[in-house]
Amino acid sequence: MKLQPLEDRIVLKAHDAEAQTASGLLIPDTAKEKPQRGDVIAVGGGRRTETGALTPMDIKVGDVVVYSKYGGTEITIDGDDLLILPARDILAIVN
């Protein structure tokens, strides 16, 4: 896949929604929560300041991140469901 996000945007593949609760109950598709974790697969170059200086990204390819529940744009490329988010929608990096 050749997808290069622009500026401070990030492309990620969302993790699947939980299919079962901690106690073992199965969750139907209609009741599943939208996932908030994903694997970063592409990162833009960074944001330019008013003076033209480039602010590098803190996130790199391969990171697992937590993002805003309803942020970003969903796209499908080569059969993969992906999400394009601005860096401000990334809440944390999971270590």
Image: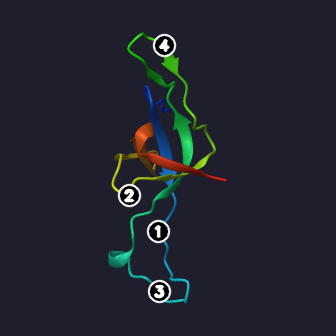
Q: Nearer the viewer, residue 77 or 27?
A: 27
- Do the CB atoms of the residues marked 4 and 3 lie less than 8 Å apart? no
Q: Is residue 45 left or right of residue 72?
A: right
In the rendered structure, which amino acid carries the disc numbered 3?
A: Leu
Q: Of tags 4 and 1, which is closer to the observer?
A: 4
Q: Residue at x 54, y 89 (%)?
A: 24
Mark found first going from the N terminus, 4 or 1: 1
Q: Residue at x 47, y 38 (%)?
A: 10
Q: Are marks 3 and 2 in contact (CB under 8 Å)?
A: no
- Pointer 2: what residue? 69
What residue did someone put label 1 on?
17
The disc, 1 or 2, on the residue closer to the chain's N-terminal end is 1
**Alpha carbons under labels 1 and 2: distance apart:** 12 Å
Crowding at dot 4, Cα within 10 Å, few <14 / some 14-19 / many 20+, comes out as few
User: Which is more N-terminal, label 4 or label 2?
Assistant: 4
Q: Which residue position is annotated with label 4?
A: 53
- Amino acid beneath label 2: Lys
Spot occupied by residue 82 in the image (x, y as percentages of width and height): 44, 48
Instruction: Please tell me which of labels 4 and 3 falls first in the chain.
Output: 3
